[in-house]
Amino acid sequence: MPRHIVAAVAYDRLCTFEFGCTVELFALPRPELKVPWYDFAVCAAERGPIRATGGVALQVAHSLRLLERADTIVIPGWRDADEEPPAELLRKIRQAYERGARLCSICSGVFVLAAAGVLDGRRATTHWKYLERLAARYPNIRVEPNALYVDEGQVLTSAGSAAGLDMLVHLVRKDFGAKIANQVAQRLVIPPHREGGQAQFVPRPVAPDERGRLAKLLDWIRTHLAAEHTIESLAAHAAMSARTLQREFKAATGLAPYAWLVRERIERAKELLETGRLPALRIAERVGMGSAESLRHHFRAQVGTTPAQYRARFSRRSR
C-alpha cells in the first residue's frame, strides 16, 4: 500500500525548532516499529534561498506542487504573524483542504492556516503571546486560550514549540495507536501523552515538596488503576489535605483528579485493546472502570469510538 506522505513547508527565516520537531517525528526511519512509517518531504513556500533561524541555510528539493499529493501538511511556525503568507501557498493549502488532506500548524503557523480560510468556524490555538492577535484578526475562529493543541479532525493547531511535539505524537497515535505512539515518545524521551486541553503554562508553580509528593502519587496511581480511588484516599496517600491535592493536581496536570484518572484508565484500555484479546469486561476490571458499559461510555467520550471499533482498527497494526 502507498505510504502516508507528510509534507513540511519551509520558508525564508524558517522557525528551526518547530521544523526540527517535524523532521524528528516523520523523517527518521523507524524499522523497529514494524509499521508502514511515513514518507516525509519538504517543500519551499517561495523561490530563493531558505535561511533558517540560527544561520542555517536549507536546500529544498520540492516546490509547492508537493502539497498536491501530500496526505498531511505541517506548517512549522511562520516567520512573522503580521506578514501575509504568499498567495500561492494559501491557494495550495485551500486546494489540499478541499481534497481532504490533513493540515497541521505549530505555534505561529496558525496564521498561515487562518489566512487560507481553513480555520473559519473551527477551534484553534497558538502560542499564548499570539492568542489576542489571532482572535482579533480572525473573529470567525474560536480561539482556545488554554490548550496545548486542538484537534478538529482534518485541521490541527498547537501552541508554541514543545506543544508541537505533543500534537505530532498525537498524530502518530491517531494513525498507529497508543502502543506505537508510546514507543516513539520513549525514543524522544518525552511524556507519552499530554492531552491537548492542558494549560499552556502554570500561573503559579507547584511547591517543590508538593511537586515531589504529587509525582510519586501519579506514578502510584498508574500502577494501581484497578483500585477504587477517592479524593480522600488519594490525599491520604500523598500526605496532603484533600483541598491541597485538588489545587496542586489541577496546577500540575491541567485536570481535576477524577478527569485525570479517567484519562489514564482509557489510555491503559487502549493499550490492552491493541495488544491482546481480552473481552471488554475483563479490560474494564483491569483498568478500574467496573463494567463494560462504563468502559464503553468513557471510551466513546474520550476517543470518539467504541472499544470494539478501536480494536478492529489498531490491534493488527500493533503486532
Image (cartoon, rainbow, N blue to C red):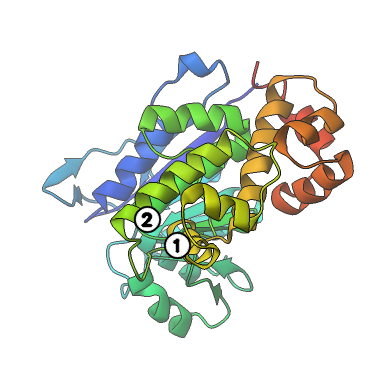
Q: Quadrant of residue 175?
A: top right
Q: Is residue 225 visible?
A: yes
Looking at the image, is 35 positioned above or below residue 87? above
- Depth order, front residue of 208/311: 208
Q: Is residue 45 visible?
A: no
Q: Quadrant of the N terminus?
A: top right
User: What whole-number distance in Å separates the C-alpha atoms at marks 1 and 2?
Assistant: 8 Å
- Depth order, front residue of 140/191: 191
Residue drawn 44% across and 63% down?
Answer: 251
Of marks 1 and 2, which one's residue comes earlier in the chain? Answer: 2
Expressed as whole percent of the image width and height from the top left, the position of residue 170 reads 54, 43
Count of picture labels: 2
Residue 43 as seen in the image, left or right of residue 57: right
Expressed as whole percent of the image width and height from the top left, the position of residue 275 reads 69, 21
Residue at the farthest right position: 293
Q: Secondary structure at mark 2?
A: helix
Looking at the image, is 285 positioned above or below residue 214? above
Q: Quadrant of the C terminus?
A: top right
Q: Which residue is mark 2?
A: 210
Expressed as whole percent of the image width and height from the top left, the position of residue 165 reads 41, 45
At label 2, which amino acid type do we have? Glu
Residue drawn 44% across and 33% down?
Answer: 185
Q: Quadrant of residue 291?
A: top right
Label 2: few (<14), some (14–19) or many (≥20) C-alpha neighbours in 10 Å:
some
Q: Which residue is mark 1?
A: 248
